Structure formats: structure tokens, C-alpha cells
Image (cartoon, rainbow, N blue to C red):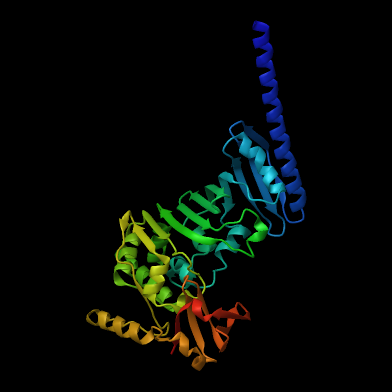
């Protein structure tokens, strides 16, 4: 009996060693293939391979060098994690079948980038095109509009060190894909992103023909030390006190948004000012309505945009309500006098917000050659120039990027039609 137990234990140990060796060889094979394919663009090296029976494989001391940029990214530890060994073994099989793996998590520890290096210069010294999404990154800071590497060095940053976790869960039966990303950068803050997609095909090739729908988006900033440093630095540049600069920063934020035709309601701006004063946490959640399309939101009235996006905003764990904004003319100037602010905003809103006239579907023929907005009964949105109406169909020319396309809508599917004037 003791011999059976001994040989059974030995066999189990041998199998464990074989599995461990198989994992090690698989990871090494994958890395060697990746290094070979990427060698024309970058040099990749690593110090060792780690693996475990609970579905984790990793690399130690990874260094990615890009000769063209004369810079490198260093990663202390990179790890892939699956829900058990079986899921890890199926990962490669699903990739070979051209399908998305059902579950995966990536942990990166100690991702290091030198602030003075070319990578960071590419990221920070080339500002993104101004938009609603860049409003928080623009600053009132003397001659500079965006913080670059020179300003980062002046603020005391030398190396950015980040721990990041990325995970996703794919449910083929429900056609649902959920992403989560957490990035914690030392002396900067924590960023959390969440994205949930519906109508998600398991084959990447199907995404172009049948793109998924965004079901939920969350963005969260925690312990924003970077914001505190920027405000202190820029207040010094302008020779302002902390309290005065807070007002300057809110005005700058409002100015940038207005340049993009968006004017936040006073309660929202006041809440943002509270966040700048104590940037502990900011969380924005969008829960788009079913059938909502992202293109063309600027052609809807502000209240309709909010009804479709269904946003929720929390600042320092406090719910901001009500949420509201208005479309404005970017060239319009706000009245600076306090007792005229309300009146000025009211005039600005009514004068600059696009005015729409709803038209009867039966009378569409009389609007040939005009740009119209169509909303179908299922919530889809289309905008284009009406060409003709015949055989129960409305034919229109729709703009797509740099080109246009001809399409038609059946009249019985159209819920609302409006023309802008």
C-alpha cells in the first residue's frame, strides 16, 4: 500500500512538472514568435518566465526598446491571468479558431517611462486636437495651454511608474463583452475605465459588418495628485493665490467647452470647482439608451442628448444633480457682470441653440434638396440631404467622413422628421 501511495505521489508530481514545463515552453514559444515578428520595429528582452497551476503565466524584467525613437519601456513584471488552468489552455485554441478568448486579465507591475524621453515627448508635447474630451487637460498656465514634458520636469516628475490591470470577460451566449482597466501611477493618481458592449460577435472579422453597441461607459479618477500639482504650478506661474487660481481654472474649463459649443449649467460648473479644490474622486457614468447612435449628437437638442446618454456624475462621492448644458455659439461672449449672468445665458442659449421645425412625413416631397434629420420608430438616427420621395421611400444622401453614400428609408419606419433653420 505504501508503495502504491509513493508511486501515486511520484506520478502526480511528474505530471505537475510536465504541465509546468509545458506552460513554460508554450510561453517561451509565444514570446519567441512575438519577438521575431516585432524585431523590425522594437527589441524585446525579458529576464525570466513564471507560471502557476491557477492559470497565471508571467514575464520578469521586460524591456521594450524602440530604436526609431531611441527610447524604451521597462516592466518589472507582466502577467496573464485566467480563471484556472483549463481556461489558459483553451486561450490558444480559441485564438487559433479566430475567436475571442472568453476571459483574460493582464497585470503589469512597475511600468516605467522616463519623463525626458521621446515616448513622453510624443505623448505630452503634441497636444491632441481640441474637443470636449480634452477640456480637462487644457490649463491656464502663462504661455502654455497644455502641460508638456518641460512643465512636468519643472513640477518634479522624472520617471512615471505605473501599475496597471486590464481584464475582460466575453459571454458568447449573451453576446456581451466587459472591459475593465485600472491604472495607478505614482504621484499622479488612479484611473479606472469600464466599458460594456452588447451585440458582440465572437469573431473579430464580424465587427466591421456588425459592430457592437455600447451599453455602459464609466470613467473614474481617484486621488488626483497630478491635478493638485498642476494647480500649484500654474498658480505660481500666474502669480495667483490658490483660491484665485481655482476660479481661473474653472473659467478656463468653461471657455474650452464653449469653444466646442457646450455650456455647462451653473450647478455642474460649481461641482467641478469643488472637485478642483479637493480632487479626491470624479466618476462619470454613461448608460446610453438602446438604439442610440453616437454620430450626430450635436444635431439634437441638449435635453434629448442627456436623455439618450443618461449620464451620472459623482464628485467626491456626492451625486451632482441636476445635470444640464446648452448648445452655444463659440463666438459669443459671456457677460461678466454678476447681476446679468442669468439674463445673458438665457439670451445666449435662445439665440445660439439651433432651431428645428418638425415636418409631417406625408409632406416630405416638398423638402427635396434640404438637409433633414430622421428618427425612426426603433430610435435610429439619420441626417442627410433629401433627394426624392417615391414608392413609399425617402431617398437621401448621407455624409460619411470624407465621402457620402446614397440610402433610402421606408416612410412607415420614420417616426419624426425635422429641418434646421
Decide: is 19 above or below 231: above
Residue 101: image location, x then y, percent: 62, 47
Q: Residue 241, image x and y in percent? A: 32, 65
| 370 in relation to 26, above or below | below
**In the rendering, at what x and y percent does residue 323 appear?**
33, 67
- Out of 99 and 324, give the one closest to the viewer: 99
Q: Which residue is the extreme one toward the top?
A: 1
Residue 244 visible, this angle: no
Left or right, 137 with reference to 249: right
Farthest left residue?
339
Depth check: give the residue in front, 275 or 145: 275
Q: Is residue 97 left or right of residue 310?
A: right
Residue 136 screen position, x and y as percent: 43, 66
Q: Is residue 156 visible?
A: yes
For the C terminus, give its image quadrant: bottom left
Q: Which of the 4 image quarters holds residue 48? A: top right
Report the front residue among 369 and 82: 369
Up/down of 221 relative to 90, above or below: below
Q: Nearer the viewer, residue 338 or 327?
A: 327
Amino acid at each position: 500500500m505504501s508503495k502504491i501511495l509513493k508511486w501515486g505521489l511520484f506520478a502526480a508530481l511528474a505530471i505537475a512538472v510536465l504541465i509546468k514545463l509545458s506552460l513554460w515552453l508554450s510561453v517561451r514559444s509565444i514570446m519567441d514568435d512575438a519577438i521575431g515578428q516585432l524585431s523590425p520595429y522594437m527589441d524585446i528582452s525579458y529576464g525570466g518566465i513564471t507560471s502557476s497551476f491557477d492559470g497565471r503565466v508571467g514575464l520578469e524584467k521586460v524591456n521594450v526598446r524602440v530604436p526609431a525613437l531611441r527610447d524604451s519601456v521597462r516592466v518589472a513584471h507582466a502577467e496573464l491571468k485566467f480563471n484556472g488552468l483549463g481556461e489558459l489552455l483553451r486561450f490558444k485554441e480559441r485564438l487559433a479558431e479566430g475567436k475571442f478568448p472568453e476571459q483574460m486579465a493582464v497585470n503589469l507591475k512597475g511600468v516605467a517611462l522616463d519623463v525626458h524621453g521621446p515616448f513622453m515627448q510624443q505623448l505630452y508635447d503634441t497636444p491632441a486636437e481640441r474637443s470636449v474630451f480634452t477640456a480637462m487637460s487644457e490649463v491656464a498656465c502663462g504661455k502654455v495651454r497644455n502641460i508638456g514634458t518641460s512643465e512636468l520636469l519643472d513640477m518634479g516628475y522624472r520617471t512615471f511608474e505605473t501599475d496597471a490591470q486590464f481584464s475582460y470577460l466575453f459571454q458568447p451566449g449573451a453576446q456581451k463583452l466587459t472591459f475593465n482597466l485600472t491604472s495607478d501611477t505614482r504621484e499622479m493618481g488612479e484611473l479606472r475605465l469600464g466599458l460594456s458592449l452588447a451585440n458582440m460577435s465572437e469573431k473579430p472579422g464580424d465587427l466591421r459588418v456588425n459592430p457592437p453597441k455600447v451599453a455602459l461607459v464609466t470613467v473614474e479618477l481617484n486621488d488626483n495628485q497630478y491635478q493638485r500639482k498642476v494647480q500649484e504650478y500654474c498658480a505660481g506661474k500666474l502669480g495667483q493665490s490658490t483660491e484665485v487660481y481655482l476660479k481661473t481654472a474653472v473659467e478656463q474649463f468653461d471657455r474650452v467647452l464653449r469653444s466646442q459649443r457646450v455650456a455647462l449649467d451653473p450647478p455642474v460648473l460649481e461641482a467641478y470647482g469643488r472637485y478642483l479644490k479637493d480632487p479626491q474622486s470624479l466618476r462619470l457614468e454613461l448608460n446610453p439608451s438602446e438604439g442610440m447612435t453616437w454620430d450626430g449628437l450635436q444635431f439634437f437638442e441638449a435635453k434629448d442628448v442627456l436623455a439618450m446618454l443618461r449620464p451620472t456624475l459623482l464628485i467626491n462621492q456626492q451625486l451632482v444633480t441636476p445635470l444640464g448644458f446648452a448648445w452655444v455659439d463659440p463666438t459669443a461672449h459671456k457677460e461678466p457682470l454678476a447681476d446679468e449672468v442669468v439674463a445673458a445665458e438665457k439670451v445666449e442659449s435662445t439665440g445660439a441653440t439651433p432651431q428645428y421645425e418638425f415636418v409631417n412625413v406625408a409632406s416630405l416631397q416638398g423638402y427635396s434638396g434640404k438637409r433633414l434629420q430622421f428618427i425612426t420608430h426603433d430610435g435610429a438616427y439619420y441626417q442627410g440631404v433629401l433627394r426624392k420621395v417615391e414608392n413609399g421611400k425617402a431617398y437621401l444622401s448621407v455624409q460619411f467622413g470624407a465621402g457620402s453614400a446614397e440610402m433610402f428609408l421606408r416612410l412607415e419606419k420614420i417616426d419624426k422628421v425635422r429641418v434646421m433653420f
